[in-house]
Amino acid sequence: MRRLLMLFILGSGCGDSLPERPEKETGLGLEEPMVVEGAPLLPTMGGALHPSLTLYSGDTAALLNPNVCASCHEDVVATWSRSAHARASFDNPWYRAVVDAFREERGFEESRFCSGCHDPALVSTGGADQAISPQDPRAHAGITCLVCHSTVRTTADGNGSMVVDIRDPLLPDPANPSQVAAHRERMRPEPLETPELCGSCHRSFMGQSIGVPHHVGGVDDIGAWRTSVYAGSHGRRIDEPVEEATCSGCHMPPVDATRGDVAATDGQILAHSVRGAHTPIENAEETRSMLTRAATIDVPRARTAEGWEPIETFAERRTVRGDLAFDVVIRNVGVGHRFPGGTRDLQDTWIELTIRDAGGRVVAEAGTNHATDDDPSAFVLRATVLDSEGRPERRHRVHRFHAPVFDRSIPPRDALAARYEVTLEGPARGPFQIEARLRHRRHSRDFQAFVCEAHRTPRGRAFDRASRELGREPVDPCSPEPITEIAEWIVGTSERTTWRRLHDLALGLSHSVQERLDEARPVLRDGRSAAETPFQRAMLDLIEGRIAARQGRLDEALHFADAAERGAPDHAAAIARVRGEAYAQVWQWESAAEAFAEVAEGAPRDAASWRDLARARGSTGDDEGAFRASLRGLTLRPRDADLLRSQHLALDRLDAGTPEVREAFLMHRTVDEGPTLLRRCQRSVEGCDRDRQPVPTIQMRTR
C-alpha cells in the first residue's frame, strides 16, 4: 500500500464506542482525535445512551432545576422560560404525541433517539427507559442551563453528539470575585462559542437502531449553514455581500436586562428564548418580525397566447382569455439554513396567489383555502419522506420513515420558482389586481388534529395538570395556530429593481429538470440587459454557466465562467465549481479535479466541495488524493453516502479496505426502494407528482 498522510480521526471502527482519552482520565467515554496513519473515518454508532450519542458525567439531577441559576441570572432564565428549549420535553404536546407513538411501536430504549436532545433530565437518569409519568418533574424540564453550559465537546455526527460534564459547576459567592471568575470560566466551555454546539442536536439521522432498515437523514440546519455565505462559504453562487452570522447571532439577539441579571453587559443579555418559528409556544412580536425577514415573494412575469411579458404589462391588459401562466418566486434572503428549517417534513409554509378583474372579482386563485381547509392548489414548502408503502409520512413518526424523496425547502440565499397555470373559458376584463402571499404556520392542520386528539386523552390532561402544579401554564395544541404573513407582493407596488427580479427568477428556474432548463435563458438575457454593474452581470453569467454545465455544453459553460470571473474576480470558488461541474459532466476528470480543489480551498466548510473533489480525484486514479478529500468531507458530514463511498473505493484500490469501511458505505447509501416508492406516491397521492418537480406547475381555480 502506498504511504498515506497522517490523518485525524475520531474513532477506529464502525459501531464501536470510543475509548477514554489516553492522556487524561475524564470518565466521559470519548477520546480526543488521534493521529493515525492511513486510518479511515467512520461514523460513531455506539454509546451508553445509544441511539442517542450524548454522554454525561457528574450528577445529572442538576439538570432538573434552572432556579438555581435564576438566583443570579433572573433575566436569562425568564427569557429561557418562554422558549421552545424550555418546552422541549413531554410537557410539549406536539413532541409528546410523536414520542408516545414512537415508544408504543418501537420501545422505550429506542426512544433515547428523541430523548437525547429533548429530554436530558430523563435520558441521563434512566427515566427514558421506562414508562413516563405526567407527574415526573424530569418530563417537564426541557433543555436547561447546564446542558449547553456544561457541554465540553461536540462532534459532527448529530443525534446529540456531545459530551456534557456536569461535575462541579463552581457555584460562587457573588461577593467573592475569584469565585465569580472561576464560575464564569467554568460556564463558558469552548463549544458554547461555536455553532457546532447547536449542530450536535440540530442534525439528526435514523437507522436500524430505531427500526428503520437503513440510514435516513433528518434535520440538518448546521449542514445547510456551513454551505452558506453566513458561514463564510462562497462556493455556491456569486452573491451580494451579507454579514456572516452564527446560530446565536440570529436566534439569541441582545435584549434589555430588566431584572438585574449579573451577567448583563451594558444592561443587556443574550435572549435565551432562542427565537425561531415556534409560534404556538412564543408568538411574540420579535418572533413574527424575525419570520418576516426570512424570505421574499414576487410574480415577475405572466404568459398569454402572445408569450411571456412583465407582470405589470399583463396587469394593464383590457381583456384576457384562454391559457395563462404566472411565475412565482420565493427567495430565502434572511435565513442561514434552509427555509423553512428544522423538522422540514412538518412545515406548513405555503403560497397564495389571487388574480382579480377590473371589478374586483376573483377570476383565478390558488392556495387561498389552505389556512382552513384542504386545498389541492396550495403549494407547501416542505420536505417529503415516504413510508414503506410509498405514502408521505406527515405526522413525523420517524420510525416509519423509509425514503426521503424530495425537499422543497430553500437553501440559504437560493430561490424557488413555481409556475401557476389557468385556462379562462370566457374573457376577463382588466386592469387586473394580482396578489401573492407567503404564509407560515408551524404545523399542518392534519398534524395538529393528530396532536389534539392525543392531548384530549386522560394522559394529555394529566400532563396539563402536572404543568400547573409545577407553576407553568400548559400549551393548548387544539387552539388554532398563529399564521404569520412572511411576505406579500401586490402588482404595481414592488420596489425591487427589474434586474433583481429577473435574477431571482433565473436562479429559481435554474433548478428545473433538464428538459426545461432552457426556459431560464431568455430571463438571463433580459437580466443582463437590465444589469447596472459588471458584478450584477457576473451573477447572471454564473447561473447560465451552471445551466450549460448541467446540459453538457462544456465550451459554453467555460465561456460564462470566464465572463463571471471578469465581473466578480473575488468569487473564485463559486466560479471554479461551475468549471468543475462542466468538466465532470463530460468526464474530463483531471480538469474537474483541479477545479474542485479550488472550490474546496475557497469553501472548506462545505462538505459538498470535498465530496466533488474526492469523486473527481478517484476518477483520475488519484486514490490517495480521493481518500484525503473524503476524510475532510467526513469531518463535516460523517454519514454522507457519497463521501463514504469515495473513502471505501479509494481504500480498496490502495489494498487498505476493511469490512467496516465497506459496511459503513452500504449502511448509509441511498435506499434502493426510493424510486419505486416515489412512483407509488406519484400514482396514488394527489400532489406528489407535482410537488416532486423542482419547478412545480400548479393549476389555479377559477370562479
Image: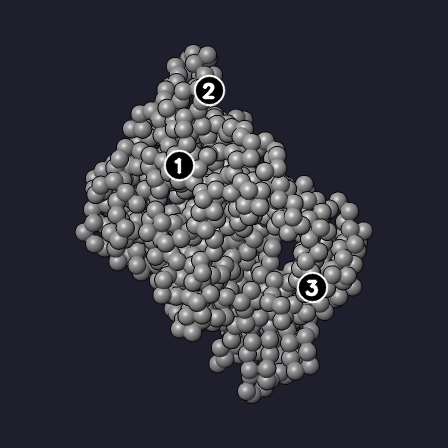
Disc 3 residue type?
Gly
**Residue depicted at 21% across the width and 54% down the height:** 457
SS label for mark 2: loop
Q: Is residue 462 left or right of residue 205?
A: left
Disc 3 from disc 1: Cα separation: 44 Å
* Residue toward you, 208 or 534: 208
Which mark identifies residue 230?
none
**Residue depicted at 43% across the width and 14% down the height:** 179
Q: Residues within 10 Å of mark 2 (few under 14, many from 20)?
A: few
3 vs 1, front mark: 1
Q: Is residue 572 left or right of residue 654?
A: right
Disc 2 residue type?
Glu
**Where is 452 relative to 89, above or below?**
below
SS label for mark 1: loop
**Residue depicted at 54% across the width and 72% down the height:** 697
- Read off the residue under disc 2: 23
* Residue toward you, 235 or 321: 235
Disc 1 residue type?
Asp
Which mark identifies residue 16?
1
Ranked by sequence position, the earlier of labels 2 and 1 is 1
Q: Is residue 208 left or right of residue 325?
A: left
Residue 635, position as x, y percentages in the image:
53, 39
Residue 33, position as x, y percentages in the image:
50, 29
- Read off the residue under disc 3: 552
Residue 422 visible in the shown view: yes
